[in-house]
Amino acid sequence: MRYEESTIEGRNAVLEAFRAGKTIDRLFVLDGCQDGPVKTIVREAKKGDTIISFVKKERLDQMSESGKHQGVIAYAAAYEYAEVEDILKAAQEKREAPFLLMLDGIEDPHNLGAIIRTANQAGVHGIIIPKRRAVGLTATVAKVSAGAINYTPVAKVTNLVQTIEQLKEQGLWFVCADMEGEVMYRQNLTGPICLVIGSEGEGVSRLVREKCDFITKIPMYGDIDSLNASVAMGILTYEIVRQRNFK
């Protein structure tokens, strides 16, 4: 189900969005505002996975498109999130070994949109992103994905480490993209697998990396030591495709 609205301003509009069941990624509230309606909105936000930020009036004024934010601005997901179980079920229905992506700290909506687009073409069954420190399914992400967001499910989870542990119990292997790993051409990337990609700046976080089964890298011969996250994901993903389908 698609959500047409991505930015919601004003107390009544934001409260109605929560009560209507819209997926709200982030809520920005005027710092120090403690009146009844705002408290109600914050209480509704805490029932779900919404990230709540208390900010100065100047920040809200800059963010506002209408100029009538009334101390609250919400960012709604442009599309509905899937459940991890739904992704696994889709792979099972296709009688294919699960092929997942896990993104750790991707904050650029253009990168996420490009990743979703490539993932769809590569036959990835679904993508897992964290609740915090990451971009959600915004309108920009949807546009950059060129429609792939309609077909490749994205699940948002509270804790990536716990999710890895749960999926390992279901037989998945986790491979982390990191320059300290073994060259991808020398590794077995077949079977039920989840490729973990980190941000350009920090890469995959330590705790997530330590939970992965093995680490892989792309051979590089240039003068810089990193690739754009969506480009790196594309290269590694298609090596997995090659090993799974063209032996």
Image (cartoon, rainbow, N blue to C red):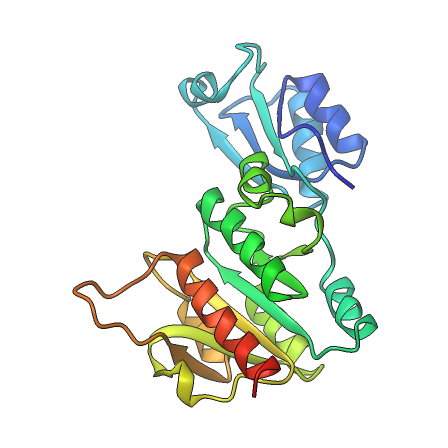
Q: Which residue is drawn at 50% across and 50% down?
A: 114
Residue 133: image x %, image y %? 47, 50
Q: Residue at x 66, y 76 (%)?
A: 167
* Drawn side of residue 240 relative to residue 222, left or right: right
- Residue 211 is situated, as x and y percent measured from the top left of the image, at 50, 79
Where is residue 154 shown, x and y percent of the image?
Answer: 65, 55
**Which residue is at the front of the view, 232 or 247?**
247
For residue 133, say whether it is visible. Answer: no
Is residue 108 rendered to the left or right of residue 25? left
Left or right? Give the position of 15 relative to 104: right
State the quadrant of the N terminus: top right
Q: How many labels does the image show?
A: 0
Q: Image height check: is 40 above or below 179?
A: above
Left or right: where does residue 143 sit relative to residue 3?
Answer: left
Task: Give coordinates of residue 60: x percent, y percent.
Answer: 48, 21
Among the 4 quarters of the image, the one containing residue 190: bottom right
The residue sitting at 71% across, 28% down in the picture is 40
Is residue 167 something that shows in the picture?
Answer: yes
